[in-house]
Amino acid sequence: MMQPLIVIADNLQITNKIIEKAIANYGSGPIITMIKKCEAAGAMAIDINSGPLSRNPKKKMAFLVNTIQKETNLPVIIDTANPEAICAGLRANRKKAIINGFSLEPGKLEKILPMAKQFNTDIIGYLLHPDGHVPANASDRLQIAVEIFKACENAGIDKNRLIIDPVLPPITWENGQFQAMEVLSVIKFLPELLDFPVRTVVGLSNLTAGNGEREKKLLLERSYLPMLCAAGLSMVLVNIFHHETIKVAKACNAIMNKDIFTWEEI
């Protein structure tokens, strides 16, 4: 039986002006309001997308983690490229946290990956080339996955701490449809390739990034999510207030994970 899809709210973003102001002024009110709304909407984890936090990164990330964990027991995903901020967030963590994330870029291998060992926590590995470019196809992604796995192994990190993000580009890319299908192949074949049930995560919002009609974007999001579930996806980053998409996630879980089906789960 497949494990249930973990739905991660990606709504706590510094691109939201209210959240940006709250972080800058250490104002907990808007953060708490957002977390409560996300949990009520069905979030099973909270992504803290704080941006680079170039000023006072340690203090601001610690503030975010502390504020959120006072209000909820949901896991937090510490989503920033700033190593100082990640470390401060992990030190502040009192419940469950996930590092988001690292890649084969030398700086991230050196500064971010070892934190998973130091704090004994999960970490997301991006299937990107060392120069940060998106791989051309599934074969390239799988090759990078092996390198990511070896990097974790060399760092002394338990393989079960690793979560793979195959990197989903926007559908509007020149080869966007092809890339979307290649991501499905990667999710499907990763456990066989790495010889253990490696978990995977996808940022669903990336699929429809850029210009486009909102209703058509939402339709595409709702259509692709069941394909990801069927491929074996473990976690999805999504706008938790896209309520119809969340209904689809619940329906997928009801089909995949229950010994006895009940309509109440949908």
Image (cartoon, rainbow, N blue to C red):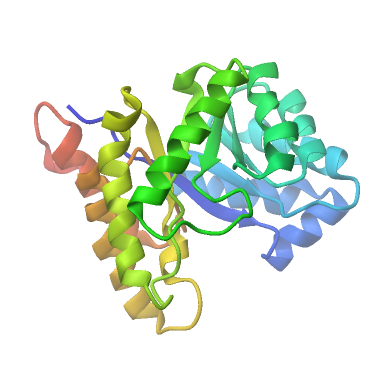
Is 208 placed left or right of 81 in the picture?
Answer: left
Q: Residue at x 80, y 61 (%)?
A: 21
Depth check: give the residue in front, 63 or 89: 89
Q: Residue at x 51, y 26 (%)?
A: 150
Where on the picture, by quarter, is residue 131? bottom right
Residue farthest to the right, as pictured? 56
- Viewer-side residue, 212 vs 96: 212
Q: Is 74 left, or right, of 217 in this rendering?
A: right
Q: Is residue 205 visible?
A: yes
Q: Is residue 245 above or below residue 81?
A: below
* Any part of residue 236 in sight: no
Q: Position of residue 139 (x, y in %)?
A: 34, 49
- Taking the image as shown, residue 6 lies to the left or right of residue 34, namely left
Q: Residue at x 68, y 49 (%)?
A: 31
Task: Using the image as rendered, state which of residue 120 and residue 167 is in the foreground.
Answer: 167
Vertical order, 261 against 205 (above or below): above
The image quarter in which residue 22 lies: bottom right
**Residue 241 spot, x, y in % from top left:** 45, 60
Furthest-left residue in this view: 260
Residue at 51% from the left image edge and 77% from the top image edge: 210
Residue closer to the observer: 238 or 171 = 171
3 in relation to 38, above or below? above
**Number of numbered tags placed on the structure image:** 0
Name the spot of residue 1 as percent of width and height, x first. 17, 27
Q: Position of residue 256 (x, y in %)?
A: 17, 37
38 left or right of 57?
Answer: left
Rendered view: 147 above or below 236: above
